[in-house]
Image (cartoon, helix red, strand yellow):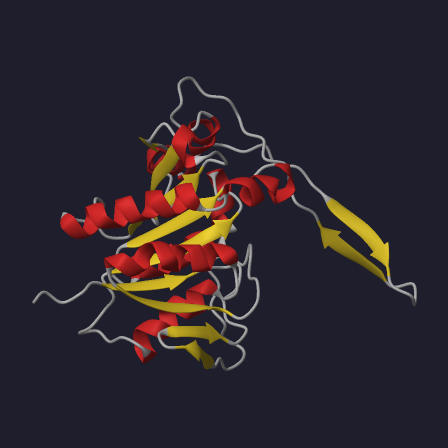
Amino acid sequence: MAKRKQILVTNDDGYESAGLLALVEALTPLGEVTVVAPTTEKSACGHSLTLTRPLRFIEVKENFYKLDDGTPTDCIFLSLTKLFSAENKPDIVISGINIGANMGEDITYSGTASAAMEAVLQGIPGIAVSQVYMNSGKSIEKFGYVLAQKSIAELVRKIFEGSYPLPKRKFLNINIPPIPASECKGFKGTRLGNKHYGFHAEVHYNPRGLEYFWIGLPRLEWMDTVGHTTDFEAVKEGYVSVTPVQLDMTAHDEIRSIEEWLQ
């Protein structure tokens, strides 16, 4: 009898997130699922490791742990030491289902994407999956995670029955459109789009008059391109966006011009 696939799951919305629980439900028929998730929300923590304080696994139930004040990267890094080993790695790491988009340059902030980054750094296939929402989350209330569950299960099954489609140090970044599953047009391979960035930070004062700032949520606006090749455009058109992301951030086309500039 063939050994069941080992699936390691995390997120950046915390271990009680509805998106995380929906992901576990979708993946359970496909293999042995182990969850290690942050105790609290760690959105926009990026690819950060905790180096200044100890961390602690807390068992919530069988094969389900929260990492006390850890980041998504901590969860993957420490899971491979405590729960797995070099000889017994998980077959795949899935991060999500994030509540909100992770598209364009936003993935550099994303704790969700960073967990998948850590997986591929450790030689394990990684997928980050995010549920785009509209109207302050009302689209999730209306449609739930049905399309996200269906999509990630189909992709993981495809990987398990065949192979991971990317070479080393590259991961898949998935964004699910905020529509009913019946209206989805399918999958589309995309590149990261380019987002319009602005500044939104509110100034407040505590009861003692001390000034503090609260960073707000930027609007989801992007630069138009010809054709529906970016993650933003694919989602807008009703497709599940599947973006291959590489960790090598070198601007290779600019190396020659930099060498000339240095002369």
Q: Residue at x 38, y 35 (%)?
A: 240
Q: Can residue 117 be seen in this view?
A: no
Q: Position of residue 79 (x, y in %)?
A: 35, 73
Q: Position of residue 123 (x, y in %)?
A: 24, 60
Quadrant in the picture for the N terminus: bottom left
Q: Residue at x 47, y 31 (%)?
A: 232
Q: Residue at x 21, y 73 (%)?
A: 86
216 sits to left or right of 146:
right
When the figure is inspected, residue 115 is found, relative to residue 129, above or below; the finding is below
Q: Where is residue 88 in the image (x, y as percent from the top left)?
A: 20, 73
Residue lying farthest to the top in this orientation: 226
Quadrant in the picture for the C terminus: top left
Which is nearer the eye, 64 or 250? 64
When the figure is inspected, residue 192 is found, relative to residue 215, above or below; the finding is above
Q: Where is residue 105 in the image (x, y as percent from the top left)?
A: 49, 41
Q: Which residue is drawn at 13% across and 67% down?
A: 3
262 sits to left or right of 132:
left
Which is nearer the eye, 102 or 97? 97
Residue 134 image-quadrant placement: top right
Residue lying farthest to the left in this orientation: 1
Q: Can residue 45 be seen in this view?
A: yes
When the figure is inspected, residue 234 is found, relative to residue 128, above or below; the finding is above
Q: How many labels, in total?
A: 0
